[in-house]
Amino acid sequence: MVPFRLAYLGDLRTQSTHGPSGTVQLTDAPIDNQGKGEAFSPTDNVASALASCMMTIIGIVARRDGLDLSSMHAEAEKHMTATPPRRIARLVVRLHLPAALAQDRREALQRAAHTCPVALSLHPDVVQDVTFSYDV
């Protein structure tokens, strides 16, 4: 089985199909780069991937330690360079976790988040601005 199949649909839109599940995802070029912005852009997916990867790794640690993080959520945003070449300059991730977590658990989960494969795979020039709020 092929992990991903991709097709160019024209008009700066692509379709990716996840081989094992058949899930389909579209991308559009963003409005500020000649696109319609009607779907995630490829660079939007990078911001989303960073946040979801961090949440997944936090979730693995939480499951191992018997912690309930069902209320955890996040926001992510990307900031592109202002001058060529066009690239991601900064990714902002705001993670919201339960207020009831003990300080030692908070520190362990924060360390885990920064070891997610996406965070470790990004070029060092991409600023990762990550904050943790214990407000849910």
Image: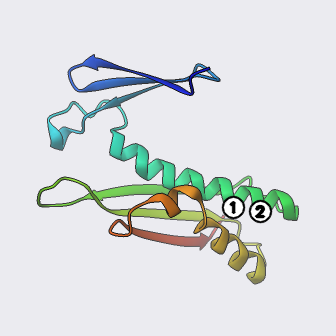
Eyeballing the image, is 122 above or below 11? below
**Could you say which is closer to the camera, residue 49 or residue 97?**
49
Q: Amino acid at mark 2?
A: Val
Quarter occupied by the C terminus = bottom right
- The answer to whether the residue labelled 1 contacts the one labelled 2, judged by CB atoms less than 8 Å apart, is yes
Question: Which corner quadrant of the image does residue 13 belong to?
Answer: top left
Q: Is residue 35 left or right of residue 45?
A: left
Q: Residues within 10 Å of mark 2 (few under 14, many from 20)?
A: some
Question: Which corner quadrant of the image does residue 41 belong to?
Answer: top left
Residue at mark 1: 58
Q: Residue at x 57, y 71 (%)?
A: 132
Q: Position of residue 105 (x, y in %)?
A: 77, 76
Q: Residues within 10 Å of mark 1 (few under 14, many from 20)?
A: many
**Could you say which is closer to the camera, residue 118 or residue 30?**
118
Q: Residue at x 59, y 19 (%)?
A: 22
Q: Which mark is residue 61?
A: 2
Question: Which corner quadrant of the image does residue 63 belong to?
Answer: bottom right
Q: Is residue 49 left or right of residue 34?
A: right
